[in-house]
Image (spheres, rainbow, N blue to C red):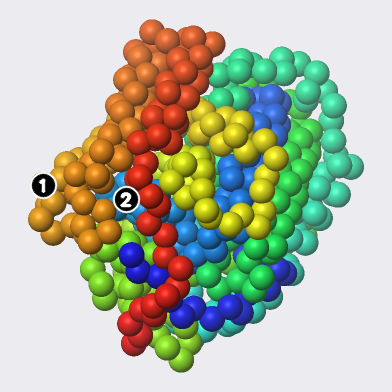
Amino acid sequence: MSNQGNFKKTISLLDLILIGMGAIFGSAWLFAVSNVASKAGPAGSFSWIIGGVIILLIGLVYAELGAALPRTGGIIRYPVYTHGHLVGYLISFITIVAYTSLISIEVTAVRQYVAYWFPGLTIKGSESPTIIGWLLQFALLCLFFLLNYWSVKAFAKSNLIISVFKYFVPLTIIIVLIFHFKSANFAGEFAPFGFGGVQTSISTGGVMFAYLGLHPIVSVAGEVKNPQRNIPVALLICIIVSACVYTILQVVFIGAIPTDMLNDGWKAIGREFSLPFKDIAVLLGMGWLATLVVLDAILSPGGNGNIFMNTTSRLVYAWARNGTLFKIFAKVNKPTGIPRPSLWLSFALAVFWTLPFPSWDALVNVCSVALILSYAIAPVSAAALNVNAKQLKKPLQIKGMAVIAPVSFIFASYIVYWSGWNTVSWLLGSQLVMFAVYCACKKYVPQDDVSFAQQLKSSWWIVGYYVMLLILSFLGSFGNGLGLLRTPVDLILIALGSIAVFYWAKYTALPKAVIDYDEKKEETV
């Protein structure tokens, strides 16, 4: 098994927190509150709390893993350590697709808000870009590429500068809208769409998309100073603070809506407030606040695009180090410590995703589910390490991990299920196709550390997991499912199935974990 390599440890705790908070406060807070309100009404405020709890549980798992195994691209390297290359290949594929599309989502968000001042960037009556609008998106991608191409420190410094402003604006909005708060907006039907609305808003309303800052923190672990301390601290701070801020933003947004606009029902809120905080500032006659929001709407997604360009290149590097992607992408530039070939691929794929998907919400649902599927592997890997790597030193041991790990896996399964059959069918279906492709190419896959037969034995659980979710989603009530399963029956079945898969995965892992310990150095360019 290859090792981590010669990345330079230049990222401090402050840098790491800003990377995580920057990833969380991107475009999601600018769009999601109206989506959540339209799907769940006032009860949508609880969506952020529930989502925060779920991410916190998963974050605790990553904190323990990250402290024990601080690896750049660790998110897609951990499953290789515990279950072999086949599982790692599946997780790598779905993660890279999600992350490269995330970059394009952020630049698209910038273009949509800039179009408030320059309408010529967006086709009239549509959310699709004009040629000039697309060129703006391309220019932003080039900027992010260059910032990450120069050095890790250039990336961190640029993120620090952007963060100073982007955190100021949400706090300003909270303070201002408190003075326009109308309790009557909460006095009517609190949950007009029932608990199903809350469930839907968590998965498809942008809630889980908003908490994506978890990934970048772990992905740059190999470049962090004192990772055993700084990774778990950064994770916990980012998750707790963001959950509080997002919940408050949702409450003040709902409270500030002119009451007469609720006569058409909550579903209309998503249409009436497509750019929610800008729109409500205009309605309240605060042009200065609308201008401030638009300025932040340019910087926040832009900062996120910068972060995700950095993160994605590390994930591509990790995939290549796993041995199931071309070796060229595992090379690191020696003077800068930057994986430049993987950065080039990340840039190219990000450009590609700007072509077929014109609007912010076109891929949010898919990206959220894809990344949750990546998240779900962490609890499984953590449990497996207790079986096949008992000698592994754990500088951070979370109390109650024996419960936290399976519970977080169950919650991850819920989020996938809540996304609905329309998303689950093709996303998990494509994963099963990739499984078949890997098996068909078994002559070419890595087998130096683990035989193909053992890889297959240690991966059947993930096939069973995907099939279970496909069946339950098809029978369920979300996203054009048949509606044969209703709450709480569907939740009980998913919980039972997830527990069964969790322990199946735990006890069919590799007999001995194959972990790199940085004994060798990778090629440099």
Q: Residue at x 42, y 75 (%)?
A: 519
Residue 237 is left or right of residue 382, and the answer is right
In the rendered image, the residue lying farthest to the front is 391
**What is the number of the mark on residue 195?**
none
For the point 31% across and 28% down, the residue is 464
Secondary structure of the residue carrying numbered label 2: loop
- In primary-sequence order, the first of circles 2 and 1 is 2
Question: Marks 2 and 1, how far apart in space?
Answer: 17 Å
> How far across and how far down the image is residue 192, in percent?
64, 16
Is 99 on the left-hand or right-hand side of 393?
A: left
Horizontal and vertical percent position of residue 62: 57, 50
For disc 2, the marked residue is: 84
User: Which residue sits furthest bottom?
Assistant: 335
Residue at numbered disc 1 = 440
Question: Residue 421, located in which quarter of the rendered image?
Answer: top left
Instruction: Using a 10 Å C-alpha cutoff, classify the residue at mark 1 as few (fewer than 14 neighbours), some (14 to 19) or many (20 or more).
Output: few
The answer to whether residue 459 is left or right of residue 99 is left
Q: Is residue 73 above or below residue 398?
A: below
Residue closer to the observer: 509 or 34? 509
